[in-house]
Image (cartoon, rainbow, N blue to C red):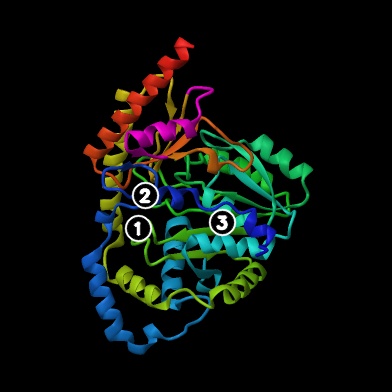
Amino acid sequence: MKYSDKILNTPSSFIRNILKVTDAPDVISFAGGLPNPISFPIDEMQKSINHAIEENGAKLFQYSTTEGYLPLRQYIATKYNNSYGLDINPEDILITTGSQQALELISKVLLNKGDGVVMEEPGYLGAIQAFTLSEPNFYTVPLEDDGLNVEQLKTTLQFNPNIKFIYVVPNFHNPTGITYSKEKREAIYDVIKDFDVVLIEDDPYGDLRWNGEKMPYIGAGRLENSVVLGSFSKIVTPGMRLGFVITKNKELMHHINTAKQATDLHTNIFSQIVVHDYLVNNDLDAHVAKIINLYQEQANTMLDAMEKYFPSTIKYTKPDGGMFIWVTLEEGTSALDFFDKAMEEKVAFVPGDPFYTAKSNVNTLRLNYTNSSPDIIEEGIKRLGKILYAISSEKQTV
């Protein structure tokens, strides 16, 4: 059997593969970016399912439009207009099968083999996987504590005219947990506005903030080639796979719509109508507030445990929201080797390697705190700390 170069060169999902081996009940897993199931509004969703069937009947089970359910798109437009002062209309929105599909559709529309993509380093591995299918050249720009290195971004754009788009996760970044500062957002805008590139701002975590103020987007509302990606996976339910693309660029939206038609005709209409029913008949802000309180407690538990059990040489981010903490081990320590030792102690995380396009055997890793109880978090970090002290002692001995 002969397979395409594009699939042979696309890595399988590191996290999905890890989850297969960490599913055992005795393994403490900080690996997956999983929302806490206790946050799912099951009773309310049950009512919405029943109500949606009563109100819509056969419509829930029929083919639908590629763009998505119009009332849901109107709800999204209103939400973003109220939250960010934008001028979004339903026709500026396309409902996708999770924001992961949005990444793949955009790469189909914009990329030919060898075209350039600017990625954060480290960057979201799901985006790396989706874009790799189109066989681009990746140009990585280091991620600092408050966003991309602006000077390197400018230089990268100046010397690589084949770059088609820039991909960023500006709020509670996956994998690092950092958030772009207002100053850095403005500086990035000042650079990008002079280049004919698309800016993709992927924002699945933006509602999950417990510290600081909501930030404006870098490009939405002022860059012609602005794309914002959103999702209901982190604030309602991930299993229904509802994401969306927002762009005022009508030509770009037309092509994304065409790619969507060729991919799956339309996103699950049952899920769209049920989620819309939930949104309009419940207090989403109150629901999200409960999620935020839960995740803040879990994040603080993990950070406190890391301060207590990790050697002082270990560095880590302290997020203001979202789902992740990024850990930097001592120089020369392999996160992959650490992972193997951690699995012997029944603790899992994601080593940093899959978050880089051109680096391997790195000394960084991602921890997720949202899918574990405080007691489990404490125990897991304690086990990891014990291993880290042992590794540090071995280095000093050598």
Residue depicted at 25% across the width and 62% down the height: 41
Structural distance between the alpha carbons of marks 1 and 3:
22 Å
Residue carrying label 1? 235
| Disc 1 residue crowd, few under 14, some 14–19, many 20+, Cα 10 Å | many
Please give left or right for residue 109 compared with residue 329 in the image.
right
The answer to whether residue 225 is seen in the rendering is no
Task: In this rendered view, identify the residue nearer to me: 154 or 213.
Answer: 154
Disc 1 vs disc 3: Cβ atoms closer than 8 Å? no
Please give left or right for residue 368 compared with residue 221 in the image.
left
**Amino acid residing under circle 1:** Ile
Residue carrying label 2? 208
Disc 2 vs disc 3: Cβ atoms closer than 8 Å? no
Would residue 124 be counted in the magenta stretch?
no
| Disc 3 residue crowd, few under 14, some 14–19, many 20+, Cα 10 Å | many
**Amino acid residing under circle 2:** Leu
Q: Magenta segment, which residues? A: 330-349
Residue carrying label 3? 220
Residue 155, percent across and down? Answer: 73, 38
